[in-house]
Image: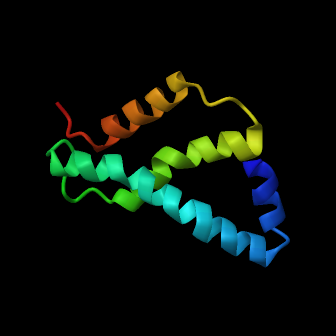
Amino acid sequence: MFRALAGQAQHDSDVAARLRVDHLSQQRDRDREPLLRAIERGQLSPETDVDLAVEQLVGPIYYRVLVTGQPVPAEFTDRLVDQFLAQISPPG
């Protein structure tokens, strides 16, 4: 259903606006929460760009769902998180 809505949003500005306001903005807030909690716990640097981190972590999932149609198993999302953490962790 999400692919159909995203497709329709390309041609219908009202659908696009509702999708952004009613779903995507709320989902983005939910996506930010674990990162904000990790910053509060000291597990991520306070300088972490949370919005960029969300895009890095969630973008590949949307790509699979909307473009390739591939499944998004837990192993895939676990690898995304592991790779993200490896990129932001100091060496050693």
- Where in the figure is residue 34, as x and y percent of width and height? 33, 46
* Quarter where residue 89 is shown: top left
| Residue plotted at (14% across, 45% down) | 42
Spot occupied by residue 8 in the image (x, y as percentages of width and height): 83, 63
Residue at horizontal 51%, vertical 56%? 27
Colour mapping used in the image? rainbow
Quick one: 50 or 92, which is closer to the camera? 50
Q: Position of residue 23 (x, y in %)?
A: 60, 60
Q: In the rendered view, does 66 fall on the left or right side of 73?
A: right
Task: Using the image, determine if residue 20 lies above or below residue 3.
Answer: below
Q: Residue at x 52, y 47 (%)?
A: 58
Q: How many marks?
A: 0
Q: In which quarter of the image is the C terminus?
A: top left
56 displayed left or right of 44: right
Q: Which residue lies furthest to the top in this view?
A: 75
* Of the pair 35 and 26, the residue shown nearer to us: 26
Most extreme residue toward the bottom is: 13
Q: In this view, does 24 lie above or below 86?
A: below
Residue drawn at x 76%, y 77% as measured from the top left: 14
